[in-house]
Image: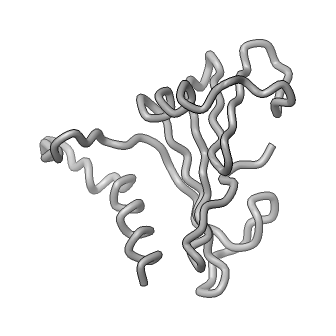
Amino acid sequence: MHAQAMIIAIALAFSPASNAEGKKEEVRFGAYPLKGDYYMYGGTLGEMTPPTPRDRKISLMLTGALAKDLFHEIGPDLKDACSSDGGYRERRRGDLNCTYTKVDGYECYIGIDVRNGKSMNGSIC
């Protein structure tokens, strides 16, 4: 049940309804809004299937200020990055993977296995 509550909270945070037009959000002390998106899936990231009660995972992509802060906190750049394109930078710590490109800016990925509540990779190379 705890995992379901966590997923609902995350989904609401990213929901367009939570940013209704013309409505100013109340901000908790010290809290900042999140930017990004998510996938809910079964199977693996490389071969996604529809989620089921026994196989439900979520991959979160964080962007904006939070992704930039995380990128700088988890350095240094990887020598064996997923891309060798000029300007591509990648950093990883545990299941948190962050990238930077001039085109896309900062992006961070993390996954959650909803069934057991444990973190996992949220992106593939």
Vertical placement of 49 versus 85: above or below? below
How far across and down, in percent of the image, does residue 95 sit? 66, 51
How far across and down, in percent of the image, does residue 40 sit? 58, 66
Which residue is pictured at 62% across the width and 45% down the height?
96
Is residue 76 toward the left or the right of residue 63 in the image? right
Question: How many badges with numbers are in the image?
Answer: 0
Is residue 82 toward the left or the right of residue 53 in the image? right
Image quarter for residue 125? top right
Which residue is pictured at 66% across the width and 53% down the height?
122
How far across and down, in percent of the image, does residue 33 sit? 30, 41
How far across and down, in percent of the image, does residue 2 sit? 42, 78
Q: How is the image coloured?
A: one colour
Which residue is pictured at 77% across the width and 48% down the height?
124
Q: Quadrant of the N terminus?
A: bottom left
Along the line of sight, which residue is nearer the eye, 6 or 102? Answer: 6
Is residue 25 toward the left or the right of residue 97 in the image? left
Which residue is pictured at 81% across the width and 30% down the height?
81
Vertical placement of 123 versus 76: above or below? below
